[in-house]
Image (tube, grey):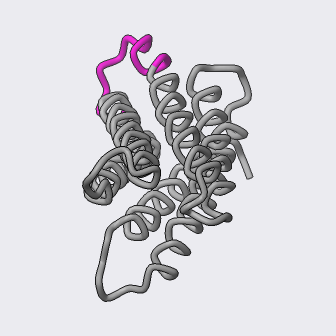
Amino acid sequence: MDNQSKSILGSGISALGTIVSAVGSTPLQRISDDALKSLNLWGNVLQATGSALQADGQEQFTFSKLGNQVQSVGNLTVISGLLGDEEEESNQKLNIAGNWMQALGAIVSLGDDLDNQSNSLDQSYNVIGNLLQGIGNSLQAISGQYSLQHTLNQVAGDPDTLNATGSWIQAIGAVLSYFAQLQPEVEEQ
């Protein structure tokens, strides 16, 4: 598989993973908590795989490659937290750290797009997509911090809505980034 195809495939897998994870992060009464947790887990597995494929599809070192690597490690960190008891403080901290790492990866990826002097549609999709992913992951990390404080009885309230909102914002950003990967392919045809 050539590098461009690998990057496109990785971006698509990552976008699919963010959607699956967003569904798993949305409090739905019709779906059991175990099923939602599984969706969130598998969504993060897809995201980690997709980000790793995107990074591998870039031969030279770029901010985008580094950002995808950081995002992949962030997803792996979230996966580590999801595999344990979600009420355990160490697992909640892994989830928080993983979301902050994903946000950092999305922002690092912006470096190449902002340095690029072309004002193309795919560049615009990438900039907006990465910003939304960074914002979404940041909201998820903040919601994780609220959840941790709630578990430790330091704050009242329910952070699930903030987490779901962040997940869906991240998903929209990932889909826009996927469209950015597809745009050059569409223009060639």
Comparing 78 with 131, the one in front is: 78
Is residue 113 on the magenta stretch?
A: yes
Identity of the residue drawn at 61% across and 41% down: 74
Can residue 189 be seen by looking at this rendering? no
Left or right: 11 as drawn, with respect to 52:
left
Tell me residue 2's x, y (percent).
Answer: 71, 46
Tell me residue 142's x, y (percent).
Answer: 38, 39
Identity of the residue drawn at 44% across and 23% down: 110
Comparing 118 with 36, the one in front is: 36
Furthest residue in direction front, as rendered: 153
- Which quadrant would residue 125 be assigned to in this image? top left
Vertical placement of 118 versus 123: above or below?
above
Tell me residue 102's x, y (percent).
Answer: 53, 38
Vertical placement of 60 versus 177: above or below?
above
User: What span is colored magenta in the figure?
Assistant: 111-122
Identity of the residue drawn at 51% across and 56% down: 12
Tell me residue 15's x, y (percent).
Answer: 46, 55
Vertical placement of 9 versus 42: above or below?
above
Comparing 16 with 8, the one in front is: 16
Left or right: 160 as drawn, with respect to 37:
left
Left or right: 167 as drawn, with respect to 53:
left
- Which quadrant would residue 141 be assigned to in this image? top left
Can residue 155 be seen by looking at this rendering? yes
Identity of the residue drawn at 64% across and 43% down: 72
Is residue 178 on the magenta stretch?
A: no
Left or right: 184 as drawn, with respect to 91:
left
